[in-house]
Image (cartoon, coloured by chain):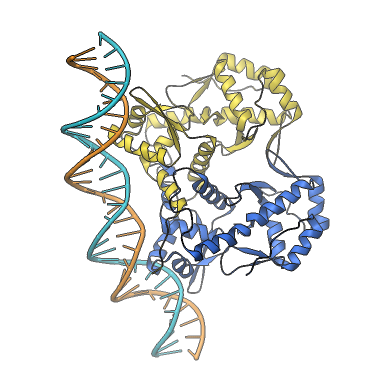
Chain colours: A blue, B yellow, C cyan, D orange
DNA sequence: GGGACGTTTCGGTGCCGGCCGAAGTCTCCC
DNA sequence: GGGAGACTTCGGCCGGCACCGAAACGTCCC
């Protein structure tokens, strides 16, 4: 009788409704490009299966691909996709009724979770205790304001230029500072262009280093010194790599 | 070999990955409570099918139920869920590769879409051309600031108290003002507590009225007068109910 | 050229889950 | 109490899709 048109929302959600595809997207939240084979191994499926999933995710606009020789590198299509997935993941962790499977069940998984909770990248900015601590320091020093969302103060803008010594890209469609819900700390950390620049700077200068191949980050001795000097941050735990 | 734990993100997405459930959620974005039978008719499925879907959505924490006698009323679990669904729906409309089915195919659907584009509720605040126009007026009069997100200015706070004559709930966990992406205008309109209060006031005072049973809104003559007086808004089209 | 390797395509299999109708339960109203 | 109406439970059916292995396709390197 009544013709039922497809619902775009359902089509988009269906892309993320599969365990394997969700694992792909969560892995890609580290902001880097992964090859098809890496993702297949990470999710524990055959290469052929991974290939089909990637085609669907790319077709749906969630992923962007970059072919290099016999490799197919793939990354999240953009910051908006990253934010969408972060929001969903945060809600899936905090939401009721989704408890089963949320807690790690093996020793290996538990230690991986602990490392992620200490510090990690969230797409292109810093998250975990590390990210929240830095965000708190920026707020405490009045470099960042929080009313509705986040906004860099004038002092904050000059801090980036003089103290940190980097220039923030002006204009552009992306917000300079925005809050991103941290799913381990359940509080907001700094995202947006400022968050991305901060993260990139920390990686470049060796203040933090990747643990293994994932998103987890460890603060180095140089990083602790720099964060104490620039932001008065202390008490960041030393993490074994 | 390796045990693969379920992914909470996938479980959450699966709830929205079905056309019927997605239709339910989109209908519930009007912020009101619907009965199970209403939703079944709206989505064009049997009552038994709707019942099962509702149980899953409630179990997943997306919906809250309220039983009254032989009726089962159901609404979105909270503003955070509404925002999540709005974000996903907005991305599904703007995103690439999801074009099929996005455009209405029947005359009836086309006129419904036109009404929604003119004005509608978005969970608990105003959206469509109506919502964007009002947001623009607030921005132009410096009652609302936009840098990272939205923030009410001092003048804006007093405008709500004196001009509009309502008091904004203080404190609370919910943001006073935040931007919400409008999927017809593809721009931001005002959401958050201030947006909700504005919408409730407009409905209470008869400035806008519901068209039919859905989310579409029409501005009344009284509404046009009030919006012109309070915000200098002109040119809001008269819509046939 | 030839072999190794990463990726893709193609059949085929099995399971999950969405759908319905019928029967059952509960509430309301007369 | 009895009947009507809203909702739920239960079987059973069916389609879609995630998965794999094998074979084909490219690319890289020797």
User: In the rendered view of the protein, which quadrant contains the N terminus of chain A?
Assistant: top left
Figure quadrant of residue B108: top left
Coordinates of residue C18 in the picture (x, y in percent): 31, 43
In the picture provided, is C3 more to the left or to the right than A126?
left
Q: Nearer the viewer, residue A141 or B99?
A: A141
In the picture provided, is B179 more to the left or to the right than B29?
right
Q: Nearer the viewer, residue A138 or A80?
A: A138
Q: How many marks?
A: 0
Coordinates of residue B228 in the picture (x, y in percent): 65, 19
Q: Is residue B22 visible?
A: no
Q: Is residue A196 visible?
A: yes
State whether residue A215 is above or below residue B219: below
User: In the rendered view of the protein, which quadrant contains the C terminus of chain A?
Assistant: bottom right
In the picture provided, is B55 more to the left or to the right than B182?
left
Coordinates of residue D6 in the picture (x, y in percent): 31, 25
Kindly identify the residue that appears in the image at 66 percent across and 50 percent down: A189
Kindly identify the residue that appears in the image at 38 percent across and 30 percent down: B107
Coordinates of residue B237 in the picture (x, y in percent): 55, 22
Figure quadrant of residue A154: top right
State whether residue D21 is above or below residue A227: below
């Amino acid at each position: 009788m009544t013709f039922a048109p497809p619902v775009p929302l359902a089509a988009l959600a269906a892309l993320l409704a599969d365990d394997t595809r969700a694992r792909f997207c969560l892995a890609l939240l580290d902001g880097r490009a992964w090859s098809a084979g890496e993702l297949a191994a990470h999710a524990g499926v055959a290469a052929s299966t991974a290939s089909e999933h990637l085609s669907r995710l790319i077709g749906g606009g969630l992923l962007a691909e970059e072919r290099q020789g016999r490799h197919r590198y793939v990354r999240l299509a953009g910051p908006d996709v990253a934010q969408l997935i972060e929001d969903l993941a945060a809600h899936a962790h905090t939401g009721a009724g989704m408890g089963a499977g949320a807690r790690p069940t093996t020793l290996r998984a538990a230690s991986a979770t602990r490392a992620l909770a200490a510090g990690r990248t969230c797409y292109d900015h810093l998250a975990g205790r590390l990210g929240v601590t830095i965000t708190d320091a920026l707020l405490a020093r009045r470099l960042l304001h929080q009313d509705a969302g986040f906004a860099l103060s004038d002092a904050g803008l000059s801090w980036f230029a003089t103290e940190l010594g980097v220039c923030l890209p002006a204009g552009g469609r992306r917000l300079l500072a925005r809050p991103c819900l941290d799913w381990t700390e359940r509080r907001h950390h700094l995202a947006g262009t400022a968050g991305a620049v901060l993260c990139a700077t920390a990686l470049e200068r060796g203040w933090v280093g990747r643990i293994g191949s994932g998103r987890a980050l460890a603060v180095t001795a140089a990083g602790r010194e720099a964060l104490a000097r620039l932001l008065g941050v202390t008490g960041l735990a030393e993490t074994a790599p």
